[in-house]
Structures are given as C-alpha cells and as structure tokens.
Amino acid sequence: MQASAVYEALGEAAVEGDLERARAAAGQLFDEYGGTVYGPMAALVAAGVYVEAGDPKAARIPLQWAIANAEDEPFRHTARLRLASILLDEGAYDEGLKTLEVESPGTFLA
C-alpha cells in the first residue's frame, strides 16, 4: 500500500510536470520498493518526465535501472525500446541498436 501511495504521488508529479517531486518519488520507489512492480513502473514514468522536461540524458538512468532490475520481461523490453529511442534521437545509433540486442525479445520482436 505504501508503494502504491508513492507511485500515485509520482503520477501526480508527472502530470504537473514537477521534476523534483517526480525525482524524489521515483528514487523512493527504487530504493524502498524496487523489487515490486512499482519500481519498473516508476522508472518508465520518471523517464517520461525527464524527456518532457527536455532532459533525455537524465531519462537514461531510470530506463537503465529498469533494464537491469525489472523482473518482468515486458518492463525490460519497454525500457529498452524507450532507451533506444533516446539514443536514436541523440545520434548514438550503434549504442541504440546494441540496446535492442536481446536473446529472446518475445512479443517485442517486431
């Protein structure tokens, strides 16, 4: 329930475009509830907040965290796709392609 409340606060901060509140809530979710589904969900939301704020380099951090820590494969693949998109925009084509190289992309193959 506590993780849910923090995630809700993250969502509110994201809607309001409050970067500092979003950063704090995401950090708390990573630190205290990273092993739950809220950790990777927070990573995806936080990355979106950073991109919207015009800081795609900062968005890399939560996406890399999700790739490394999410237990559910769909979260890892979604984070990979979003990170590759950021890298593409930055012109880091080889790094973006490398991000997408996985053994079993499942339904994310396309």
Image (cartoon, grey):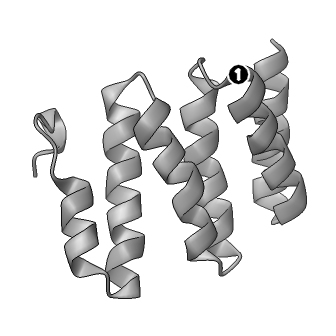
Residue 63 placement (x, y as % from top left): 50, 51
Q: Please, is residue 95 above or below residue 41 in the view?
A: below
- Snapshot quadrant of residue 87: bottom left
Residue 23 placement (x, y as % from top left): 80, 53
Residue 31 placement (x, y as % from top left): 74, 30
| Residue 56 left/right relative to 94 | right
Q: Nearer the viewer, residue 57 or 45?
A: 57
Can the viewer see residue 97 in this picture? yes
| Residue 12 left/right relative to 67 | right
Which residue is painted at 80% across and 11% down in the image?
1
Q: Please, is residue 3 above or below residue 27 in the view?
A: above
Q: Hey, which residue is sitting farthest bottom in the picture?
A: 91
Residue occupied by mark 1? 33
Q: Hey, which residue is sitting farthest top in the picture?
A: 1
| Residue 66 left/right relative to 34 | left
Which residue is painted at 20% across and 61% down in the image?
98
Tell me which amino acid carries mark 1.
Answer: Tyr
Residue 81 placement (x, y as % from top left): 32, 56
Can the viewer see residue 18 in this picture? no
Which residue is painted at 11% across and 34% down in the image?
104
Q: Nearer the viewer, residue 104 or 98?
A: 98
Q: Nearer the viewer, residue 109 or 95?
A: 95
- Snapshot quadrant of residue 51: bottom right
Q: Please, is residue 92 above or below residue 72 in the view?
A: below
Tag 1: Cα neighbours inside 10 Å, few (<14), some, or many (≥20)?
many
User: In the structure shown, which secondary structural element does the residue marked by tag 1 occupy?
Assistant: helix
Which residue is painted at 18% across and 43% down in the image?
108
Give the mark count: 1
| Residue 90 left/right relative to 105 | right
